[in-house]
Every structure is written in structure tokens, then in C-alpha cells.
Image (cartoon, rainbow, N blue to C red):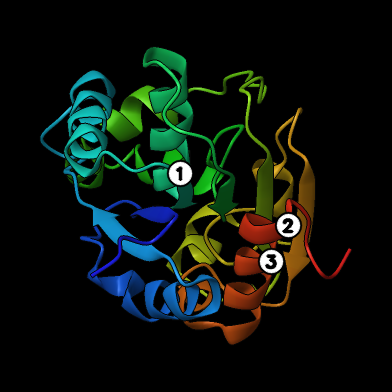
Amino acid sequence: MTRPLQHIVYVHGLWMSGSEGLLLRHRLARALGAEVHAFSYSAVLHGMDEITARLADFLAALDPPRVHFVGHSLGGLVLYNFFERHASPPPGRVVFLATPCVASRAAEQAGHAPVIGALMGRAVAEELLTRRERRWRFDRPLGIIAGSLSFGVGQFIAGFDEPSDGTVAVSETRLPGASAHLVLPVSHAGMLVSARVARECAHFLAEGCFRES
């Protein structure tokens, strides 16, 4: 069987395994004729250094001629750190889905509770509990999709007074240097089962822009 010309690596968010993105991955594979892989990690057990090193090994085993990346929530920050710390993989594009690029008000508030803070793990503490200045300066286009349907436990924890997906505020998803930013009426988890999100994600990976703007 002929190998696909391009591959997509999906990186999940906190407390997920990759299986929650099965429908999104299926839609991307069908839309782009690509092979889609789920990279799994534990933010609770491992820090970002180890997670990104494992992602580097994961890619080396795939040895793809072309590779795109899709990161949901914390998965986007895994990708950001991967590009910071490792040599650039083969060419391709990147999409962040509801990634808190600046910080996460919901994570900050939840982190005050010792039990929840412990369950978040080191990677979350490193990336989300302290506001950081980030800029996309890597040699591959980045598209960001944020949600504006406030449905989720994070809405009650963070007490958002601005548009959010119920877990992450739209303002928290904005990253200087990104090629495009799109806000859709979806929740944080609902983003993964939305046909509209999948279409926009596939369009950006194929063309470097969103259909809607």
C-alpha cells in the first residue's frame, strides 16, 4: 500500500488520552487523505521536557515526509514547547484548538485547591499557572480556533466575564505571530465533535487559511 503523502499528529489536552478526538481525526483523515496519529502523554506524571522528548521519538518512528499538527487545549502548548526545544520536523502546518496560549484563569483558580492542583500535574503547573509571554516564531503557519459557547465546569471556576468556551477565554487563545485566529460557537469539549471545526481545521492544514474569517 502506498504511504500517504502527509501525516497529521493529534495531541490531546489535560486528563485526556487521544481517544476523545477520534471523530475529529476521522474527519481530517477523510478530508485530506492523510494518516492521522494520536500522540498520548501524561501531564500528571511528566514535565514538559519529558513529554516533548517523547513526542520527538514518536515522530522519529513515523519518519513522515510531511506532517501537520493539531493540538487541543494543553496539547497546543505541548506543540509550542516541542518546537521550542527540538529541531523542526518535516514541513507542514499547525492548528491549535482552544489552547490557552497566555495562561488559564480556570487552571489558576482550580490550582488553589490542593487535590485538584495535584491532579493537574507538573506540565500544567509549568505552563498554565503562571502567566507567560509567548510568540509563534516557528517556520510553519499556525491557525487558532477558539470557542465562544460557554458550557463547562471551568465557566463556574473561572467566572468568565468575557467570551469563552466554558473552560478557556477567547482572549487566552490569542498568540502573537499566528497566521489566523477564528472564533466559532462551540464549547471546549464540543470543539472535538463539531463538523464545522473539523472543516475549518482541514482547510487550514490544506491551504494555510480558514474558510471563514
Is 49 left or right of 143, judged from the image as shown? Answer: left
Left or right of residue 158: residue 143? right
In the image, 35 versus 110, the foreground residue is 35
Mark identifier at residue 42: none
Labelled pair 2, 3 in contact (Cβ < 8 Å):
yes
Which amino acid type corresponds to the residue marked 2 in the rendered image? Glu
The residue positioned 54% from the left and 47% from the top of the image is 99
Q: Which residue is mark 2?
A: 207
- Disc 3 to disc 1, C-alpha distance: 16 Å
Q: Mark 2 vs mark 1: give the one in front.
A: 1
Q: Nearest the camera: 150 or 32?
A: 32
- The amino acid marked with disc number 1 is Arg
**Residue at 63% of width from left, 24% of height from top?**
139
Mark 3 or 1, nearer chain start: 1
Q: Which residue is mark 1?
A: 66
Residue 203 image label: 3
The x and y percentages for residue 201 are 61, 65
Crowding near the residue tagged with mark 2, few <14, some 14–19, many ≥20 C-alpha atoms within 10 Å:
few
The CA distance from mark 2 to mark 1 is: 14 Å
Q: Residue at x 53, y 70 (%)?
A: 32
Secondary structure under tag 3 reads: helix
Q: Nearer the viewer, residue 198 or 175?
A: 198
Q: Are marks 2 and 1 in contact (CB under 8 Å)?
A: no
Mark 2 or mark 1: name the one nearer the start of the chain: 1
- Mark 3: which amino acid? His
Gap in Å between the C-alphas at discs 2 and 3?
Answer: 6 Å
Residue 96 position within the rendered picture, expressed as x and y whole percent measured from the top left: 56, 50
- Graded by Cα atoms within 10 Å as few (under 14), some (14 to 19) or many (20 or more), the crowding at tag 3 reads some
Measured along the vertical axis of the image, is residue 9 above or below residue 132? Answer: below
